[in-house]
C-alpha cells in the first residue's frame, strides 16, 4: 500500500487516545517515514464550521449557537480546522460545501453502487403519492421543518408520508424504490447519499442544493430546490 487516507482526521488504530490531534500527527509522520503518501478525507460535520455556515446561508441548522449540537460542532471545528490548515498533504471532502471550510481541498464525490438496487415502482402513478424522508440527524436535516410542511398535505389526504429511521443502510434503497418523492435535507444546502440513491432510482428528489453547491458541480443537479417555507407548495406542484 503506497497511500493512506486518514478519515475524518482520526488516528489510524481504533484505540482511544487522550489527544487525537497529536495521535493523527504521529501517525502521519510514521507513515511518511515508511514512504507512504498521507491524505485526509472528511465526510461532513467534523469540518463544517457552524459560525461560517450561518454567515453564508439564508437558512442554517446552526442559528442558535447555544444549542447543544451546534456548540459541540463549533468546538470541534475550532479545534480541528487549524490542524487541517497546517497539514501539508492532500485533503479531500465528500460534499462541495466543505470547500467553504477547507478551500485547498479536492472534492471527492459521493458514489452509490446501483448493481443491486431493486426495480423502482412507476413514478407518481398511484392515487396518493408516497413521500419519504430519512433523517440520519434530525437537526441537520431539518426534519421538524420537513414534517411541519408536510402535515397539511397529509391532513388533506394528498400524500402518504414515511419517515425512514433505524433501518440498516442496505435496506434503504428498497424503501426509496417504493416511493415517489424523496426529501433529503432543507437546511444545509448540500446533497448526500440519500439524494444520490433517490436520483439513481429515478425518484423525484427534493432538498436544498444551494448556489454554492450547484456552482461547483459541473453538471445539472436534478434536485427540486426548496427552503423550509417553500416545501409545502413545492410538493403540491409536484403532485
Image (cartoon, helix red, strand yellow):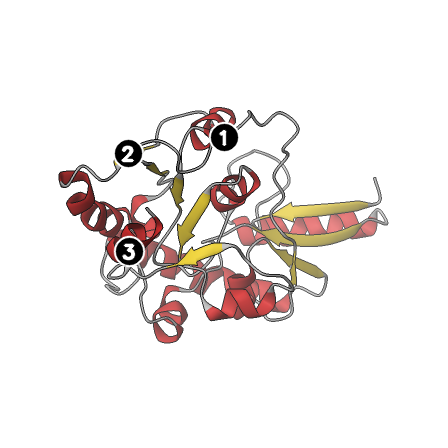
| Picture quadrant where residue 74 is located | bottom left
Element class at badge 1: helix
Upstream in sequence: badge 2 or badge 1: 2
| Residue in the image at 28% along x and 55% along y | 231
Mark 3 → mark 2, Cα distance in angstroms? 18 Å
Q: Which residue lies furthest to the bottom in this view?
A: 55
Of residues 195 and 25, which is closer to you in this image?
195
Mark 1 → mark 3, Cα distance in angstroms? 23 Å
Mark 2 → mark 1, Cα distance in angstroms? 20 Å
31 lies above or below 78: above
Quarter of the image where the N terminus is located: top right
Element class at badge 2: loop
Of residues 162 and 95, which is closer to you in this image?
162
Of residues 169 and 51, which is closer to you in this image?
169
Give how far across and how far down residue 171 sits, in percent.
48, 24
| Residue in the image at 13% along x and 40% along y | 155
| Picture quadrant where residue 216 is located | bottom right
Give how far across and how far down residue 61 sits, in percent.
31, 59
Of residues 24 and 208, which is closer to you in this image?
208
Label at residue 173: 1
Residue under numbered circle 3: 231
Q: In this view, does 206 lie to the left or right of 128?
A: right
| Comparing labels 2 and 1, the label whose residue is closer to the camera | 2
Q: Residues within 10 Å of mark 2 (few under 14, many from 20)?
A: some
Upstream in sequence: badge 1 or badge 3: 1
Give how far across and how far down residue 126 sits, in percent.
35, 31
34 lies above or below 105: above
Residue under numbered circle 2: 128
Q: In this view, does 218 lie to the left or right of 199?
A: right
Residue 148 in view: yes
Element class at badge 3: helix
Amino acid at each position: 500500500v503506497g497511500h493512506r487516507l486518514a478519515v475524518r482526521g482520526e488516528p489510524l488504530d481504533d484505540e482511544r487516545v487522550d489527544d487525537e490531534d497529536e495521535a493523527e500527527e504521529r501517525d502521519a509522520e510514521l507513515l511518511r517515514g515508511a514512504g507512504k503518501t498521507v491524505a485526509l478525507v472528511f465526510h461532513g460535520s467534523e469540518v463544517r464550521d457552524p459560525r461560517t455556515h450561518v454567515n453564508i446561508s439564508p437558512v442554517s441548522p446552526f442559528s442558535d449557537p447555544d444549542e447543544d449540537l451546534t456548540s459541540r460542532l463549533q468546538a470541534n471545528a475550532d479545534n480541528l480546522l487549524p490542524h487541517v490548515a497546517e497539514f501539508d498533504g492532500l485533503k479531500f471532502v465528500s460534499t462541495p460545501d466543505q470547500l467553504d471550510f477547507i478551500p485547498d481541498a479536492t472534492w471527492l464525490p459521493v458514489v452509490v453502487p446501483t448493481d443491486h438496487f431493486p426495480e423502482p415502482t412507476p413514478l407518481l402513478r398511484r392515487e396518493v403519492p408516497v413521500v419519504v424522508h430519512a433523517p440520519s440527524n434530525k437537526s441537520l436535516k431539518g426534519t421538524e421543518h420537513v414534517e411541519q410542511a408536510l402535515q397539511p398535505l397529509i391532513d388533506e389526504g394528498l400524500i402518504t408520508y414515511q419517515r425512514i429511521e433505524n433501518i440498516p443502510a442496505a435496506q434503504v434503497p428498497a424503501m426509496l424504490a417504493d416511493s415517489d418523492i424523496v426529501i433529503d435535507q432543507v437546511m444545509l444546502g448540500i446533497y448526500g447519499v440519500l439524494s444520490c440513491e433517490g436520483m439513481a432510482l429515478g425518484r423525484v428528489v427534493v432538498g436544498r442544493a444551494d448556489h454554492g453547491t450547484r456552482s461547483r458541480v459541473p453538471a445539472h443537479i436534478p434536485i427540486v430546490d426548496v427552503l423550509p417555507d417553500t416545501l409545502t407548495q413545492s410538493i403540491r406542484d409536484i403532485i
